[in-house]
Image: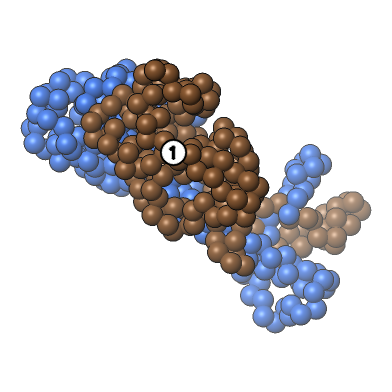
Chain colours: A brown, B blue
Amino acid sequence: MTHPLQAFFQRIKLFSTLTGDELNELLRAIQPAQFAAGRTIFREGDPADAAYVIESGRVEILTGRGVDEVRVAELGPGDVLGELALLDGARRSAGARAVDQVSTFRIDKNEFDFLRRNLRPAAFKVIRSITGTLCDRLRETNAQIRAHLTPALLPLPPVLEEAEEAGRDDDKRKWMGKLTFWSNR
Amino acid sequence: MTGNLNSLRKLPLFQGLTFAELNALKEHLTLRHAPAGSTLFTEGEAARSCFVIVEGEIDVVTHVERRGDEKLATLGPGALVGHMALVDHRPRSATCRVGVRPARLIELQRAEFEHLLNTNSPFAFKILERVALDLVGRLREATARLGRKARSRGDRHQRALDAAAALLGQGDSSVSTDEIDPDSIEVYIPSLEERMSGRRKP
């Protein structure tokens, strides 16, 4: 029997390689979960016990707590959050909160681990898919680190600007000597 | 590859594999001796294989604009090297170079690695899980590193701007030049071309 959610899940990249039967098997590990606007879905540092697929509504991803809280992303329908829980069950590296009324499908880690222990193709394909996502995120994070390592271009001090415009190379050299290269090291 | 299956099994990537599985895999593995300082692969290249470090250290290096090569990590025995480009079919994200001592590595060719990643045999399942967990670990490290960089850069950037402003006799009067060690001020002065091309942003 075809699960009523099959069509919805097949369109989500994380599950797009699963056959109908494999998806059916996975869907048995899934329960709907609703969150009212402003409700916390999980907090940074919580044990990671589930992944969520957003059916409707918006979810903000947050790092830090209290005044240090920073919103790092906003996710919407069809997006998956907390999928690393399915892999290693470590603590949440970021928190998630419902922006408006949010409807999700919750994939329980224990249920998923059962499929994994039994070497079910559905689990294999989901992990394979998460592995691809991980590469994207690692490349993206490394690119950001590289950007932070790149020396910043500060505005030219006006005194240098004037020297340069007037073609006074001596003045320019004098200031260049005082202001050494900026580095983030 | 010839050699002891038991020693192969001690490497994290191959832990949990049966002797039969290791035996089947063995013929696809090549033991490589890499001289100190030699380059395994270069950022931007297409990937042909990945490696497991048996002995020695590998430096992961990236090229940073206006600065040169920057070391991102040093990996030791047991670590997997160069698998990301095989998983996502994109160019090498960094350069890998052998450290100050010669290294011994096990090389796994692209075709065999892909076969392991895409056939869902129990054997492939184990390898895939190892690869995925390794990537999660690296992502967590990279995210933590980025967080530290982002925080320290904000401070240093502001300090340098304050210092430059104070030295030039403008800006915030609360910054006294007495407190500033001139050697500690590092300001990048863009070339005329860089400024003309509109990249003059702090």
Residue at horizontal 27 percent and vertical 36 percent from the top: A114
- Residue A82 in the image: x percent, y percent? 46, 44
| Image quadrant occupied by the N terminus of chain A | top left
Q: Is residue B186 left or right of residue A114?
A: right
Relative to B171, say whether A133 is above or below. Answer: above
Q: Does the image show residue B172? A: yes
Outermost residue on the right side: it is: A166
Q: Quadrant of residue A18?
A: top left
- Residue A104 in the image: x percent, y percent? 53, 40
Q: Nearer the viewer, residue B69 or B130?
A: B130
- Residue A63 in the image: x percent, y percent? 55, 56
Q: Quadrant of residue B120?
A: top left
Residue at horizontal 89 percent and vertical 57 percent from the top: A162
Q: Is residue B38 left or right of residue B24?
A: right
Q: Nearer the viewer, residue B179 or B90?
A: B90
SS at circle 1: strand
Outermost residue on the front side: it is: A1
- Residue B55 in the image: x percent, y percent? 21, 42
Pinpoint the chain carrying mark 1: A
Residue at horizontal 12 percent and vertical 30 percent from the top: B18
Q: Does the image show residue B110? A: no
The count of marks equals: 1
Residue position for label 1 = A31
Label 1 amino acid?
Answer: Gln
Neighbour class for label 1 at 10 Å: few (<14), some, many (≥20)? few
Relative to A128, say whether A1 is above or below. Answer: above
Relative to B94, say whether A162 is above or below. Answer: below
Q: Is residue B26 left or right of residue A103?
A: left
Residue at horizontal 55 percent and vertical 38 percent from the top: A54
| Image quadrant occupied by the C terminus of chain A | bottom right
Relative to B3, say whether A110 is above or below. Answer: below
